Amino acid sequence: MNTGNIQKSYEIARERYAAVGVNTDEALAKLQKIAISIHCWQADDVNGFENLGNLGGGGIQATGNYPGKARNIGEVRADIEKVLTLVAGSHRLNLHEIYGDFQGKAVDRDAVAPEHFTSWIEWAKEKGIKLDFNSTSFGHPKSGDLTLANPDKAIRDFWIEHTKRCRLVSEEMGKAQNDPCIMNLWIHDGSKDITVNRLKYRQILEQSLDEIFATEYKNMKDCIEAKLFGIALESYTVGSYDFYLGYGAKKQKIVTLDTGHFHLTESIADKISSLLLFTPEIMLHVSRPVRWDSDHVTILNDDTADLAKEIVRADALDKVHIGLDYFDASINRIGAYVIGIRSTQKAFLQGLLEPIDTLRRYEENGQYFERLALLEEAKGLPWNAVWDYFCLKNNIPVAEDYITEIQKYEKEVTSKR
């Protein structure tokens, strides 16, 4: 890619945006600071490193059999390191509990401890990466259809202990990196068919959460994630959006919005302004549902763009945590990472380049024709020239040049696994 042409195109774009009241340099400075929490489970199809025998289930299903997936911690880390050379900015890594460094030992989930993530903490510090965390309720002999909402006290207590320990791991991560670790709690609990004791299971889940959150920490933040349904649990989800929204507002917990966990015609962007009023912060899991929560690779589509724009319009970049959550095993996994990260960044760049001051003034004055006209014209402004310059400034491949880099990594590394 010709560096001179990229610079010239940016200068033209900067002038064009200035004409509508947008400072592209300021937009790029803000984009530089947006950290995306990269999900470790794209690298190995959500297998993890337990020696318990991952049973799958809970709505988790990576489809495809593209060669070269990561088989151990070293390969996951190598793949993440490669991804970071192809995306701009400083980002985070989101770990599920099953990705602990168990040293080949069988460590059950109610016995997990901070020591199992010491090497992750050291690696992250060396690479300048901050860590986030997730408890793991699926793929275990005691998972079944119900975990934290299970009427069986022995099963329920097992998962309560697991989640308590995950919070402690998160606290130690946050303390070590001098930045809060965001810990996400998602369970698959539900029923395949008609459920008549809906209230009962939600009462149990509320009690379990209260017990889990009884200990307060300073170096981690709790997130609670809803879901519309799970595979084989289609008729009833205990941890629905209504449940977690109510619990989050009441107990001041962060509510996680996964873009694949709602009806396909439902606007997740519209939820941002409401949650900001009643919950302390928001966590995003940006994905792409295709007819259902299929966890396709995030792309720059209308849903992703609308979500990013709404966050920028609400001046909420400091209150919204951005993470990715998808796992596509049918294509090159490194490529899946890079497409998703760069597409999410592009969405936020488009939001940062909106002529928001003029749009707000039109709206306040009741100038709705002018508002709609400017919104439409803004779609054709040369944001892509600004994006190319952003990549150039960060010394990463511009435009489609990253494709060759990934092909080279596949030839030299992943194809030999």
Image (cartoon, rainbow, N blue to C red):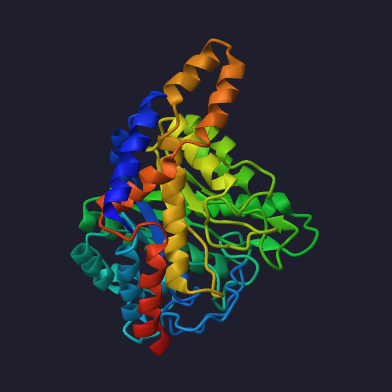
Eyeballing the image, is 16 above or below 393?
above
Q: Relative to 341, is 113 on the left or the right?
A: left
Left or right of 315? Residue 396 is: left
Residue that protrudes farthest toward the top in the picture: 365
Placement of the C terminus among the 4 image quadrants: bottom left
Q: Could you tell whether 254 is left or right of 231 in the image?
A: left
Does the image show residue 180?
no
Residue 322: horizontal and vertical position, in percent? 42, 49
The quarter of the image holding the N terminus is bottom left
Image x and y of residue 191, in percent: 72, 63
Residue 266 placed where, x, y %?
A: 66, 43
Question: What residue is rendered at 37% in x and 37% in y?
Answer: 13
Above or below, comparing residue 350 to residue 71 in the picture: above
Which image quadrant for residue 403? bottom left
Q: Is residue 238 above or below residue 145?
A: above
- Number of marks in the rendered image: 0
Residue 249 place in picture, x, y as percent: 51, 36
Give the camera-side residue of 52 and 260: 260
